[in-house]
Every structure is written in C-alpha cells, then in structure tokens.
Image: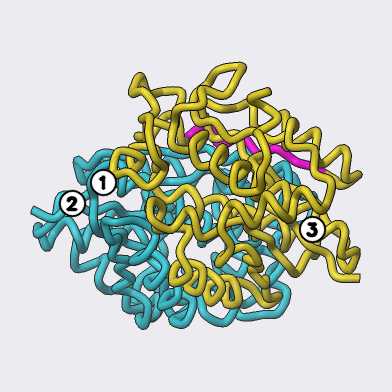
Chain colours: A yellow, B cyan
Amino acid sequence: MTKALIILSGGLDSTVLAHQINAANDCQLAALSFDYGQKHTRELACASAQASQLKIEHTIVALPFINELFSSALLSNSDAEIPHGHYQDESMKQTVVPNRNMIMLSIAAGVALSQDRSELYYGAHSGDHAIYPDCRADFVAAMQQALGLCDWQKIALQVPFLHLDKPEIVRRGVALGVDFRQTWTCYTGGDQPCGKCGSCVERSQAFAANGLDDPLLD
Amino acid sequence: MTKALIILSGGLDSTVLAHQINAANDCQLAALSFDYGQKHTRELACASAQASQLKIEHTIVALPFINELFSSALLSNSDAEIPHGHYQDESMKQTVVPNRNMIMLSIAAGVALSQDRSELYYGAHSGDHAIYPDCRADFVAAMQQALGLCDWQKIALQVPFLHLDKPEIVRRGVALGVDFRQTWTCYTGGDQPCGKCGSCVERSQAFAANGLDDPLLD
C-alpha cells in the first residue's frame, strides 16, 4: 500500500482532506503539523485530536526560527492585530508568513523521504488564491516539479482541493462525518473564534452556503 | 543597491562565492547558515569567521527537527561512518540528508523576503551533481520557478557556480585571497580533516589541480 503524509494544520481544509484520504483507504497515512509561532496555536490541538480520531501517526515540528526572523501579523511576535473583514481584502495580506508554505512542503518532503512515503498531501484550495501566492496552481505546479527532482525517490505532491472552494469542502466534511468542533480557523489567539477576521468570515460563509451554522459559534 | 542573501555553509564553495559577490560590490550581502545536526558543525565556525572577515551580517538558523526525524550518515544522530573513497562513489549517497537543500533554500527565501532581499545565492557546483539530485540544473530550474511564484515579491535564485568544478572554484578563491584555513569540507566530526572521506578527497584533488596543497592538511 502507498505510504502518504499530509500536512495537517488543524484547520478545516486539511482536516476534511485527511478524512477523505482515510475514507478512501488506499494509502497508509501519517500527519505532520508545524508550530511556527502562529498566534492560533489552538489549531495544533485540533490537529492532534483529528489524527487521534483517524488513528494516524502525528508529528508536530517546531520552527522557532520563524518567530525570531520573520514578520507577519499571524505570528505571536507581532503586536499587529489580525485584520477584520472579508478574506479577499487587501488587508489580509498582512497575515502572510513569507514563504511559509514552501518551508512546510520542503520539510514535509524530507520527513516523507525519511519514512519511505511517496505521496505528500497539501490542502490548498481555491479560496486561498486571492491572498496567498503559495496556494495557487502555478506555484503548486512548480513545487510538484521540484519535488520530483529533489531526490532519487520521487515525492508526488497531491493537492486534490486546489480547485475547490470552501463551501464544497464543508459539504464533503459533513458527508464524511467530520467533527468540525475540532477544527480551528480563526487567526486571532483567543479561546473562542473572533468571528470577525477574514478567516472566520470565510468559514462562516462556507457553513451558511450549506445551510449550517459553524458549530464553534453555537 | 540590490540586497542579497547567501547560504553560507562554511565549506569551500559557498565561501568562495561569498568572496566573489563581495568583490563585485554590486549588492548588499548577508549570510545565512544552518545548524541541522551535521557531524561537521565545525563548518559553522568557519562560516562565522568568513562573514566576519567580509563584514557581512551572519545568522545561524537551528533546525533541530532534522536530527530528530531524518536519517543520514551525515547527521550526529547516526552511528554510520562517513564512507571513505571517491566523492562520486555510490556509498557517498549515505551522506544525503533528505531534501536538505530545498529546506535550506525555502527558509532562506523566507528570511530574504522578511529582510526585503530580492536575490538568493546558492553555491551548488558541478562536482555535486553525481551524488546530490538537489544540486543539479533541473532541480535548480524548478526551484527558480517556485521562488518566482511563492510571494508577490520575486526571489531570484542565483547559482553562478552550477556549471563550475571544484578546481575552478579553488582557482577563483586563490585569486580572491580567500583564507582556505577558515573553510571546512570534511564530513566526519573531527578537529582535523580525515583526509579519507569523499569530501576530503575531492577537496584535495581540487587544490592539487591548482598545484597547491590544502592548507588544512599542512
């Protein structure tokens, strides 16, 4: 059976993707998360809970250098407030962590190679495209090329949600019985979702499009 | 003036490259090194010494997860001996750290973006090609593509030694007045170069091709 690794943030998208892969039952899956100094470390507890429910191996990699050397409103080193409003607003660009996704993908590929895993799953989806260059199809294609060349063993980068939007991902998650109470999306560091940041707004709209309320906001 | 960042290992190739860039005096250069659990941490002291001589900012990023999660004879977590013999021998493949170079490049790009640096220098050269897929031209081209797409600001990956061999790099280093006593190449963890590992053998041959002895072996 193919061995695969998923980058599991504990957010909604990668969680639904992990459930979808697990349900297909055609590969042996493990999960990798990153503690990069994000304000919303609560997502890591969600990632652990989901991995535990899926009965898959889960590793959290600490990347303390990001908080020391990088600038972003998303990081706990920053006093900048997470912007409110719609996800596609220009202000959300403040939440970009420079080259974060390539860093995660490259480390995940190294772990996959070390564990003899030939597939790497990444939960980027179409709603990310406006704000995050490193969630777009042309970036993904370049990384697929690089990951096919970085070692004698090829790593296949799989991005099945690349052209799906968040309402469709919620729809799939509902069908798969995902416990959305154990997913975390809000970018602020609170114990409850703020309901106001772009990330919260996008999540709410995705539930609403399915005729549902976000269970975290009940 | 363009701001650039170089991945400076403290080995011979990246050191000569740093001196070459500095001598050209057409960009403001800083250096980044990685402590990834290599047995030969001595190279990091050399990197610091070279950066200090060049009067450029130097940062060492610690990547403890590599020693925890990755397998390679190059790592201090491994009891495997560094193989002796010629650099191009099959046995040298044991010294590959899975996806190490993509990890370094992606982190360096994140640092460059955070410091508003638009160029990233990488000292891969043609002698690495037989052993290390992630030093080859097709891998470099894929990474150039990905680094041009990962952010709104493009990062230009510069690999000026890609098609040069080590004797030519030594020749350039001599012309630039590089202090080769402050460069480290041996893959074993000793205080003196072993003179027997593939890396030492390749270095010795590069000096010999220039009619010189390696000053570290005097």
Residue receiving disc 3: A20
Q: Residue A119 vs residue A140: left or right?
A: right
Q: Residues within 10 Å of mark 1 (few under 14, many from 20)?
A: many
Please state the extent of the stretch shown in magenta in the rendering.
Answer: A58-65
Q: Are marks 2 and 1 in contact (CB under 8 Å)?
A: yes
Q: Is residue A63 magenta?
A: yes
Amino acid type, residue under disc 1 in the picture? Ala
Q: Secondary structure at mark 3?
A: helix
Q: Residue A133 vs residue B20: left or right?
A: right
Task: Kindly report the distance in space between the C-alpha atoms of the residues bearing marks 1 and 3.
Answer: 45 Å
Q: Are marks 1 and 3 in contact (CB under 8 Å)?
A: no
Q: Secondary structure at mark 2?
A: strand
Q: Residue A99 vs residue A22: left or right?
A: left
> Taking the image as drawn, is residue B47 in sight?
yes
Residue B196 spot, x, y in % from top left: 63, 66
- The subunit letter for the residue under badge 1 reads B
- The subunit letter for the residue under badge 2 reads B
Give the mark count: 3
Q: Which mark is residue B46?
A: none
Task: Kindly report the distance in space between the C-alpha atoms of the residues bearing marks 3 and 2.
Answer: 44 Å
Amino acid type, residue under disc 2 in the picture? Lys
Amino acid type, residue under disc 3 in the picture? Gln
